[in-house]
Amino acid sequence: CLNNIVLDITELKSQIQKTKASFFEATTAIAFQYFSDKNVDVALIETGLGGRLDATNVIKPELSIITTIGKDHSEQLGNTIQSIAAEKAGIIKSRTPCITSVKNAIALKIIKSIAKDNNSPLIEVSKYAKLKVISNEIDSLNVSLQVDDLKLRNVKVDLVGSYQRDNIKLAVSAVKLLRENSKFYKVNKQTIVEGLRDVRKNTGLRCRFEMLSASPIIIGDVAHNPQGFEALSKSLVDAGLHDVIAVFGIMED
């Protein structure tokens, strides 16, 4: 794999230099080439910043996903929820479904307007999926979930934190919608359950309310904006951790 990546860089080098591509633009192009060479079944592409003008936004996706919207990267995206929502909704493509877990009424109004302009079906997770927490441990969640006509009972999820409840609903809703496309026929109820159970192992995801030590209890979390800290605070309370010391580092901007 590493040899192939080096070859990709070599092949694209002259074009990168010619267009004076930024580091992110160059690495995005290299990634796309790599995914194409490997003929991947599915590529999940996350925007780097915003959406509308992001380097990743050249693709024509099967499904657009907008998670939540809060004030972040204001220097580039604007200082209001309206401007940030407009940038994020810039990933919505013509006649391509979009699914969102955005609840903020102002942001949701912007997203609905842009989806309508693009003749794109918009699915709101809050209306499409329901989740009930059966038990909330410090290192796992047990939930029951209903997404449209798909019902999952007593499913263990290895990600905790109050914000993961919306993320679970969003992820399973996205998979449910993609299953309606024949190319995703191998995804069934069992693979969804196994995927939820083994998120950390399958992805290497770190520091999403991750217990780094049990004695003393040390939690690592990547919260870095007001919205993130509200979610982290709620997650600590839900886990029964009220008297905490925070060690915090952040970029100057």
Image (cartoon, rainbow, N blue to C red):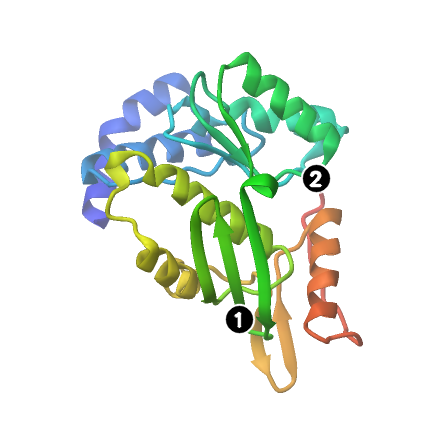
User: Is 66 placed above or below 112 here?
Assistant: below
At label 2, the amino acid type is Gly
**Residue 182: quadrant of the picture:** top left
Q: Which numbered marker is on residue 219?
A: none
Q: Position of residue 192 (x, y in %)?
A: 37, 56
Among all residues in the image, which is located at the extreme right? 243
**Residue 194: quadrant of the picture:** bottom left
Among all residues in the image, which is located at the extreme top? 117
Left or right? Give the position of 226 relative to 133: right
Q: Position of residue 244 (x, y in %)?
A: 77, 74
Which residue in the protein does label 2 denote? Answer: 70
Q: Position of residue 31 (x, y in %)?
A: 33, 37
User: Is 171 placed above or below 144 here?
Assistant: above
Q: Which numbered marker is on residue 140?
A: 1
Q: Residues within 10 Å of mark 1 (few under 14, many from 20)?
A: some
Of labels 1 and 2, the one closer to you: 1
Q: Nearer the viewer, residue 140 or 21?
A: 140
Q: Nearer the viewer, residue 132 or 49?
A: 132
Left or right? Give the position of 208 relative to 95: right
